[in-house]
């Protein structure tokens, strides 16, 4: 399969970089007039995909909101992945998996093996058992044309105690993760497949080298307080490779497709204005 970075660059250039989360938590289901059960979960997810698949490049299902319903919820997640892919969209599975050895390999097979019903274009992963613990996921992603988004500089306040900690060599832990990703993406054209999660709410990040030749998944635009206009300040010259994620800012405009479409179009237009292609 064509590498994820190549497919993502093409999708961003044609449909724009907006990523819409599929986060069916209980309060959103209720605001849509849906029951907090598997039927509501399925209706919610299908509506989002059907409404936005023609205009959004990337969808990011949050696995936890499906897994809380057990096997029936996972079945809905499988169908959601299939629906997005059938519509020509890219799936970034937000599962934040992280472990060592055979367990990490099993997580990778779940989301990054082409024969898995949950096969996704990319997977969010946690490197805080050491970046080397991600090797099974890195290897399988390369083999199957998929990608990873590694937690590097997250927007939650608690993340700083780990990510901003300074190593013996003077680098912060977050900067170390960015350096590893730059090495993974060395020589890739037009874009590497191994990206970082970097919060759009973090302000000036000029002290970090975000030029990893890979995508930067940026949560925080919309309900968390960041705007499209903040992206050039936060990401600097790397802003062209940013994939801004909006979840509640779009999803709260459901359940009617037109509301979702209008909200996504507004965010996409603001991003294009702030970060010209």
Image (tube, rainbow, N blue to C red):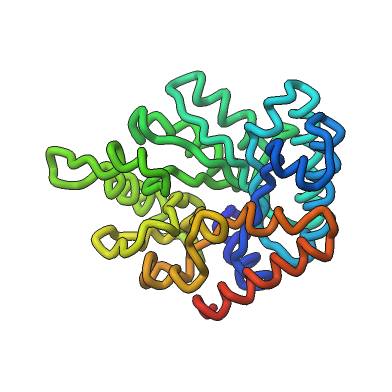
Residue at 87% x, 33% y is 39
Place of residue 227 in the rendered image (x, y in percent of width and height, measured from the top left): 50, 67
Q: Nearer the viewer, residue 240 or 43?
A: 43
Place of residue 225 in the rendered image (x, y in percent of width and height, measured from the top left): 49, 59
Residue at 59% x, 53% y is 4
Place of residue 210 in the rendered image (x, y in percent of width and height, measured from the top left): 35, 60
Q: From the viewer's perspective, is residue 26 above or below residue 259?
A: above
Q: Residue furthest top?
A: 102
In the image, taking residue 232 as reference, residue 176 lies left or right, namely left
Q: From the viewer's perspective, is residue 97 above or below residue 8?
A: above
Q: From the viewer's perspective, is residue 160 above or below residue 183?
A: above
Place of residue 145 in the rendered image (x, y in percent of width and height, measured from the top left): 60, 47
In the image, taking residue 151 as reference, residue 118 lies left or right, namely right
Quadrant in the rendering for residue 141: top right
Residue at 41% x, 47% y is 154
Number of numbered markers: 0
Residue at 46% x, 29% y is 98
Determine if residue 1 is in view: no
Q: Nearer the viewer, residue 250 or 127?
A: 250
Q: In which quadrant will I find the C terminus? A: bottom right
Quadrant in the rendering for residue 20: bottom right
Determine if residue 161 is in view: yes
Q: From the viewer's perspective, is residue 81 above or below residue 135?
A: below
């Amino acid at each position: 399969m064509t590498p994820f970075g190549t497919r993502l660059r093409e999708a961003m250039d044609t449909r724009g970089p907006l990523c819409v989360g599929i986060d069916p938590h209980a309060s959103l289901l209720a605001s849509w007039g849906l029951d907090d059960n598997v039927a509501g979960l399925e209706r919610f997810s299908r509506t989002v995909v059907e409404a936005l698949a023609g205009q959004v490049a990337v969808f990011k299902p949050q696995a936890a909101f499906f897994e809380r319903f057990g096997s029936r919820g996972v079945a809905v997640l499988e169908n959601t992945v299939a629906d997005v892919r059938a519509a020509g969209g890219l799936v970034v599975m937000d599962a934040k998996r992280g472990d060592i050895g055979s367990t990490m390999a099993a997580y990778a097979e779940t989301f990054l093996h082409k024969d898995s019903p949950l096969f996704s274009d990319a997977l969010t992963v946690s490197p805080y058992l050491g970046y080397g613990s991600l090797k099974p996921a890195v290897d399988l992603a390369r083999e199957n044309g998929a990608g990873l988004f590694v937690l590097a500089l997250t927007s939650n306040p608690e993340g700083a105690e780990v990510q901003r900690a300074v190593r013996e060599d003077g680098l912060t832990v977050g900067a170390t993760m960015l350096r590893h990703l730059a090495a993974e993406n060395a020589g890739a054209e037009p874009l590497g497949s191994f990206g970082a999660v970097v919060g759009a709410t973090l302000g000036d990040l000029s002290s970090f080298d975000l030029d990893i030749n890979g995508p930067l998944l940026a949560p925080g635009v919309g309900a968390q307080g960041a705007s499209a206009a903040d992206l050039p300040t936060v990401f600097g010259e790397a802003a062209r490779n940013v994939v801004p994620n909006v979840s509640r800012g779009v999803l709260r405009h459901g359940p009617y497709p037109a509301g979702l479409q209008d909200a996504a179009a507004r965010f996409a237009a603001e991003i294009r204005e702030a970060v010209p292609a």
